[in-house]
Image: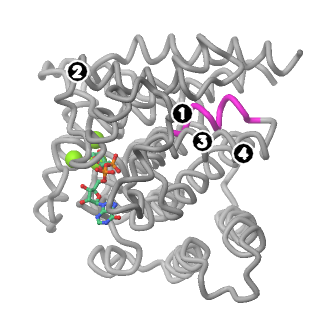
């Protein structure tokens, strides 16, 4: 029903914000056992009613996610040139948010070329290969929400929203996979256990179509996301909790291929208790676990948080934790605005 869906919109965008804000201080860390103890204490403290610490700043992941929300609420027909303008305007007014090293070249070229061809600067990245960073995937949650009822429209919109900065197939397909996972979470009942096996199998079937059938391939060997999802399934089945091995198999870096499947794994693994993470809250567990893997912690925690929030809705978000995040009130309002325009589109 509508009340639940509205709560899931908020949960998703706030989960994404929390993952980014709390993950950012650990970006690039290699997590040891001692690091995990520190992380447990960090979250325990932040959840306390009386803890007064400095506000945790969000990074580029949230800055760009907000641009996509604004683009959808201001122009519900989805205008990618407008979206590109918002990315560029946001970057030049607030550049110190930890953007990827190379994506800033795209922003400069877009501005210099007056947005004439919004996909061309991204195509020129990395000697014409296009970036395969996770900068597309990290910002797509609002599109999964907006197109919650229209799978094909979501895929098309995610692809175009990504191509403004990232044109490598792995960047685009990673963003598509992230949006599929969020969309599947919206359909889950928060009062029931997640069938993780089915969740992954659904993603495998969908990625097979994207990576194999749509490409006209007669072999499944060139389907890197499908392969990673098979690894996710194996790791969930084996209940393997060895961080080094999980990172070796799935990755934890800024490549989309080494972070989107990892975020999906974190969300699914967090449906059951995890050693050295003490909490009953599955949203916190998803985010804390993602950070505990180290590497690109803000992005992986943000993507896992958007899934957990889309599953559980905003009632399950610890409000003490949330109030330490920069801009949480605005993000909550933006989720409601996005829900309002989505309803208009649904009923049109
Ligand atoms: O993908 P992008 O927006 O970066 C997102 C990450 C997230 O973790 C954010 O939280 C933020 O910290 O950055 O930015 P890009 O500049 O497109 O890509 C990021 C990095 O990925 C680049 O600086 C490269 O190191 C690497 N990379 C590549 N390296 C070689 N060849 C991306 N694509 C390539 C490539 O084709
Ligand atoms: Mg970031
Ligand atoms: Mg960074
Ligand atoms: Mg990051």
Q: Which mark is residue 94?
A: 2
Which residues, given as a range, are shown in magenta?
140-148
Tell how many labels.
4
User: Foreground mark, 4 or 1?
Assistant: 1
Q: Are marks 2 and 3 in contact (CB under 8 Å)?
A: no
Residue identified by numbered label 3: 160
Secondary structure beneath dot 4 equals loop
Is residue 215 rendered to the left or right of residue 314?
right
Q: CA distance from mark 1 to mark 2?
A: 24 Å
Q: Say whether disc 1 or disc 2 marks the residue closer to the N-terminus.
A: 1
Ligand 2 closer than 8 Å to the CB at disc 2? Answer: no
The crowd level at tag 3 (other Cα within 10 Å; few <14, some 14-19, many 20+) is some
Q: Which mark is residue 188?
A: 4
**Percent position (x, y) of residue 40?**
22, 49
User: Foreground mark, 3 or 4?
Assistant: 3
Secondary structure beneath dot 1 equals helix
Q: Are marks 2 and 4 in contact (CB under 8 Å)?
A: no
Is residue 243 rendered to the left or right of residue 56?
right
The answer, for residue 145, to whether it is visible in the render is: yes
Q: Quadrant of residue 46?
A: top left
Q: CA distance from mark 2 to mark 4?
A: 36 Å
The residue lying toward the viewer, choosing from 34 and 290, is 290
Q: CA distance from mark 3 to mark 1?
A: 21 Å
Q: CA distance from mark 4 to mark 1?
A: 13 Å
Q: Is residue 145 magenta?
A: yes
**Percent position (x, y) of residue 124?**
38, 53
Residue at x 81% of width, y 24% of height: 1
Residue at x 28% of width, y 26% of height: 91
The crowd level at tag 2 (other Cα within 10 Å; few <14, some 14-19, many 20+) is few
Residue at x 31% of width, y 58% of height: 254
- Above or below: residue 120 compared with residue 2: below
Residue identified by numbered label 1: 12
């Amino acid at each position: 029903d509508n009340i639940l869906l509205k709560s899931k919109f908020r949960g998703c965008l706030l989960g994404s914000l929390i993952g980014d804000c709390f993950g950012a201080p650990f970006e690039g860390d290699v997590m040891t056992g001692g690091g995990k103890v520190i992380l447990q204490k960090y979250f325990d403290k932040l959840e306390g009613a009386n803890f007064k610490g400095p506000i945790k700043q969000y990074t580029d992941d949230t800055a760009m996610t907000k641009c996509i929300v604004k683009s959808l609420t201001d122009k519900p027909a989805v205008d990618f040139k407008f979206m590109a303008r918002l990315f560029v305007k946001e970057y030049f007014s607030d550049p110190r948010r930890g953007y990827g090293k190379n994506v800033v070249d795209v922003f400069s070229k877009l501005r210099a070329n007056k947005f004439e061809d919004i996909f061309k600067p991204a195509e020129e990245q990395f000697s014409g290969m296009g970036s395969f960073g996770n900068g597309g995937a990290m910002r797509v949650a609002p599109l999964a929400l907006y197109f919650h009822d229209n799978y094909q429209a979501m895929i098309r919109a995610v692809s175009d929203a990504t191509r403004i900065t990232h044109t490598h197939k792995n960047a685009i397909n990673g963003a598509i996979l992230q949006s599929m996972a969020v969309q599947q979470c919206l359909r889950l009942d928060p009062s029931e256990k997640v069938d993780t096996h089915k969740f992954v199998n659904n993603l495998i079937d969908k990625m097979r179509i994207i990576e194999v059938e749509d490409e006209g391939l007669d072999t499944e060997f060139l389907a890197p996301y499908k392969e990673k999802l098979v690894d996710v399934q194996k790791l969930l089945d084996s209940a393997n909790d060895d961080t080094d091995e999980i990172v070796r198999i799935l990755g934890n870096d800024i490549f989309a291929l080494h972070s989107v499947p990892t975020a999906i794994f974190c969300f699914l693994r967090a449906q059951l208790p995890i050693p050295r993470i003490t909490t009953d809250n599955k949203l916190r567990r998803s985010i804390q676990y993602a950070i505990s893997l180290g590497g690109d912690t803000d992005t992986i925690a943000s993507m896992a948080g958007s899934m957990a929030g889309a599953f559980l809705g905003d009632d399950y978000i610890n409000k003490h934790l949330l109030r330490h995040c920069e801009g949480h009130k605005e993000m909550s309002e933006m989720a409601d605005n996005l829900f309002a325009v989505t309803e208009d589109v649904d009923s049109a």
